[in-house]
Amino acid sequence: MKQNAMRPASDPHEGKILPFLPGGDPWVARHVRDLPRSGIRDFFDLVQSMEGIVSLGIGEPGESTPWKIREQAIFALESGKTGYTSNLGLLRLRRAISAYMERLTGVRYDPEEEILVTVGVSEALDCALRSIVNPGEQILYAEPSYVAYSPGIVLAHGVPVGIPTRFEDEFRLWAEGVEEKAKPGVKALLLNSPANPTGSMVEAGELEKIAAIARKENWVVLSDEIYAELTYGKRHRSIASFPGMKERTIVFNGLSKAFAMTGFRLGWACGPAPLIAAMVKIHQYSMLCASIVSQEAGIEALEHGAAEVEAMQRAYQRKRNFLYRSLSSLGFPCHAPEGAFYLFPSIVPFGLSSQEFALRLLREARVAVVPGTAFGPSGEGYLRCSFSPRMPDLEEAIRRMSRWMRTNFPGKRTRVAGH
Amino acid sequence: MSKEASFSDELLRLLEENPLRSPETLAKLLGSEASSVGEEIARLEKEKVILAYKAIVDDEKAQRRTVKAVIEVKLVPERGGGFDRLARRIARYPEVTSCFLMSGGYDLLVFLEGSTLQEVALFVSEKLATLRGVTSTATHFMLRTYKEQGVLVGDAVEPERLPVSP
């Protein structure tokens, strides 16, 4: 773990009587104190302080939750549904989740003991990590990765081990990369396919090989499949659907992305009963249960929201085409993502670091994107551009970027043939 | 569905959403070429699949004093022609903005627009009700518009999003 730049490695406070500090610094646990601030947080603060920014930095759907789901939430409030629910979540919701997951992955989970409803996938992942990690055990994950993976592992007293993925491989995780890190001390593999921030998916053949490694090494697999419904031309495969994998895999999913319900904070974990039971221990003492209003809305979403999901998926597909074509023609080397709603273009041809490029784009073109380094060291040289904003915003962002690129990098513009 | 059918289907959907996008933008959205999009639009227009492109206006904001009404019209069907001939005759009046054949308690639902209440009332009593074959009319004036052709009017709340999120 990188030391906090503000503090020397040895603790200067050791053995001294500490004065009261408003920041509470000396009281903060070492592993929390040493955790770097999220790169996205710094960037957020800067963007917040500026006016007239068009943002491709959002990590959530640009559209609001479909009306009938919102309406159900209102109805739940009107009906006086304002109390706690079972720790596991409403049984009717767990049944709906079970049916939904079976449609999506082909794997059946028992609503009574193999499904836990959580406050988003974030809480589910936190519970899972805290349930399985003994201090010092390693967790593997593909990198660049979602911002919470590495800190989440550290907060569970584990050791994050990133497996770098490369632009040349369209940022796909290969079994070979996993095999290289398969050493004693590894407890689990954390997968994310389709992935934030790269939009890449693990190929089915590789998934099969990775499953074989996990079985051989006796790993737990944590599979974050929150973008499973948002794929473009390729169907999602869950690693839990391979033989002998349901028994060792916790699958995470939720309503945030496909159903545009980020603010409802509703996710779930599906997995073997003993692991779910361990997670429930943590969940019941920390979160107790997910909001009942969100759970009621969740039932409506899962039982009657398929048409809305399909319409949003179609809209994402078009916007993906648009942003991919537009960024390519501005001279950014990039891949058309297979899933999620992000492009991860390269800025290597322009000779700036991710941070410098994103800062200049923000200050000079007034377009916000997220520097790739917010997602780990292998994100250097890339930007995360979301195509979830509404179309007029995407068009405006491209107009601004186009002007800015012409001024700053004339001659880099290339024509892209075909799709 | 054939590939061609789904391409024009998608294109129509995009045009219904916003007819002002350039063929270049439409091509980017569809993962196609501007020339193919241009040709397809020309074909759809020529074959009258696309009838017209119109703006949807908030009359209140535009401070228009237009009077709008819907009229339920009962007809006597004609031998051989059913309701078609009479319905098309009614639809031809420029005051009529939409006209539908309906199931249920009446036969035609006619949308009218005029500049005053009196003008609309006169049109119904003098033009519509006097047509041979029209047996009755019931006029309902519209008081306020909340949604027009799929677009919410008056309370367009944009979803709020943090500019940068993980």
Image (cartoon, coloured by chain):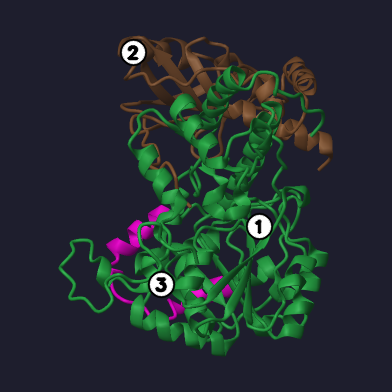
Chain letter matching colour green: A
- What type is the residue that disc 3 sits on? His
- What type is the residue that disc 2 sits on? Arg
Indicate which disc residue A151 carries: none
Tell me the chain of label 2.
Answer: B
Percent coordinates x, y for residue A184 in the rendering: 68, 84
Q: Residues within 10 Å of mark 3 (few under 14, many from 20)?
A: few
Q: Who's the residue at 35% across and 68% down the image?
A: A291
In the rendered image, which residue does mark 1 sit on? A194
Tell me the chain of label 3.
Answer: A
Q: Residues within 10 Å of mark 1 (few under 14, many from 20)?
A: many
In the rendered image, which residue does mark 3 sit on? A31
Residue in front for this viewpoint, A272 or A207 = A207
Percent coordinates x, y for residue A235 in the rendering: 74, 58
In the rendered image, which residue does mark 2 sit on? B64
Report, in whole angstroms, how far the alpha carbon at label 1 lies from the one at label 3. Answer: 30 Å
The stretch of residues the image draws in magenta is A70-98
Percent coordinates x, y for residue A17 in the rendering: 17, 76
